[in-house]
Amino acid sequence: MNSSQDRGFCSLPAIPLWVNNETLIGSSKRSMPVFNPATGTPAKRVTFASDDDLERALAVAADAFQSWAAVPPVKRARLLFRFKQLVERDHDCLARLISEEHGKTVPDAAGEVLRGLEVIEFACGIPQLLKGEYSPQVGSSVDSFSFRQPLGVAVGITPFNFPVMVPMWMFPIAIACGNCFVLKPSERDPSPSLHLARLLAEAGIPPGVFTVLHGDAELVGRMIAHPTVAAVSFVGSTPVAESIYRQATYYGKRVQALGGAKNHLVILPDADLDQTADALIGSAFGSAGERCMAVSVAVPVGAQVADELVSRLKPRVTALRIGPGDQAGAEMGPLVTEAHRERVAAYLDLGVNEGARLVVDGRGAAVPGQGFFLGGSLLDHVTPAMRVYQEEIFGPVLSIVRAANLDEAIRLVNAHPYGNGVALFTRDGAAARRFMLQVNVGMVGINVPIPVPMAFHSFGGWKRSLFGDHHVHGPEGVRFYTRLKNVTARWPGSTVTGAEFVMPTAS
């Protein structure tokens, strides 16, 4: 970077940290540009947290924990109700921020905000969710009861593709349970996290309960190793999820690490192919394929079904309306960075070299301006041995893998190392039930292409799509951010005299 470029970079608006309910410019000398993917130009710069920033933030969070954990759950819920109202008030603003820094269309971003709001709504029920169990007279004059207590300071490390929804999968439940929370959002689109922090402060969150620190893998490593941190929650690619899981468990942290996906949609011969094609277009190319629940593999059962499906998909993929996120009628925006666009585009040549047929080449699509746009692509005759099938592409590329029958389709899905989401399109209830029971995947859709659970259920995959014992949000989220404590009590008036040397029993 020459001196004039450096001056230009330094003049970009700086995105600060959020510590102790106030903004703080990161004191590290490291920072990076935040691009508008629709124009391809840097719009802001994000300042990274230094070691001193991290120490200060964690000290503030640790100090805040004892008093926050002592706040009655009903009062924590009332604060979250106020926060929910503020997120609803700023819904459109948050959607625009997402679109400006991630690139997804504004309507898609608005849906992301709504799915995050649903987790806040779930967390508002924390007084009910934290209720324990009570058993009187488990022994003579002995009662037993249990309850859940918060862990301390929890850390959330979230991806670029959902800068509002995924953080809200974590922190509303964590703070509702009485923990303090430190968010490390993606450095590619960090502004929405700062907006959420300001709304929490406006709702009345005490200083130190919610913190935002910016950085990259260096900061993540320091956070995981820090003795103040009790729990780590991560969503991102499988290689990083596995690395974070290993680091966190080495340091004795509680950890949930959600990784990548290769989601299949199996189509039986009795399915309505026009409805199926529409479902595939939306689920494969919405948000430019940058979703962990995007369908990236269609599995038509039978050669005739496959040929007819491809004939329906080809014109639909070619006709995708591509444009900036705020452009009326745009169905697909740009990818998040230039490097990611080039990575996704390289898979098309790889697929052809491996023997797949490139039915639609998104590199030839008419795209606007100098942004990070790539048209939708369709690969047919993909086989399980190909890298384009084995690896997560995370872009607007749909692969067709043909199966002879339902048994072969189930074996195909079960053999893949990822097990995040899967769907089956059919009118046959018996076949759907067999598929549901036999497929080794964490989230299953029947005639639903993107089977994301509602907030009062829990989200998570199997196999190499999840590391750790807990899924995210819903009842699993409450269990992840708390510890169970059991108490057995007998009061002095009923205490028997003399020492007892045998195992206590209820007899």
Image: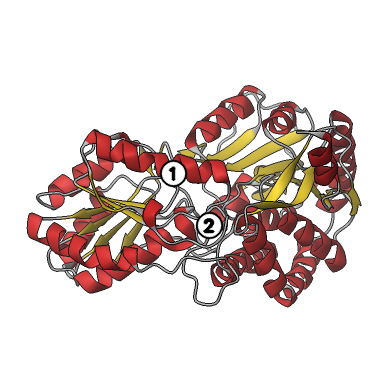
On the rendered image, what quadrant is the N terminus found in?
top right
In this picture, residue 28 sits left or right of residue 463: right
- Quick check: can you spot residue 70? yes
- The residue drawn where x is 81% and y is 48% is 211
- In the picture, measured across the screen, residue 145 lies left or right of residue 47, that is left
Nearest the camera: 133 or 127? 127
User: Which residue is identified by label 2?
Assistant: 334
At mark 2, the secondary structure is loop
Task: Please state the horizontal and vertical placement of residue 252, each as a whole percent of the image.
Answer: 65, 26
Q: Are marks 1 and 2 in contact (CB under 8 Å)?
A: no
| Quadrant of residue 219 within the rendered picture | top right
Image position, residue 177 (x, y; %): 71, 54
Q: In which quarter of the image is residue 229?
A: top right
Q: In this view, does 425 lie to the left or right of 324?
A: left
The amino acid beneath tag 2 is Pro
Q: Is residue 16 rendered to the left or right of residue 258?
A: right
Label 2: how many residues lie within 10 Å, few (<14), some (14-19) or many (20+)? Answer: many
Q: In this view, does 248 lie above or below 337?
A: above
Image coordinates of residue 458 in percent, x first then y, are 50, 55
**In front: 268, or 189?**
189
Q: Which of marks 1 and 2 is nearer the N terminus?
A: 2
Q: Would you name the residue on which mark 1 appears?
A: 344
- In the rendered view, would you say 312 is above or below 345? below
- How far apart, in angstroms, are the residues tagged by discs 1 and 2? 12 Å
Residue toward you, 100 or 392: 100
Name the residue rendered at 31%, 44% in the picture: 440
Q: In the rendered image of this protein, does residue 376 appear above or below residue 386?
A: below
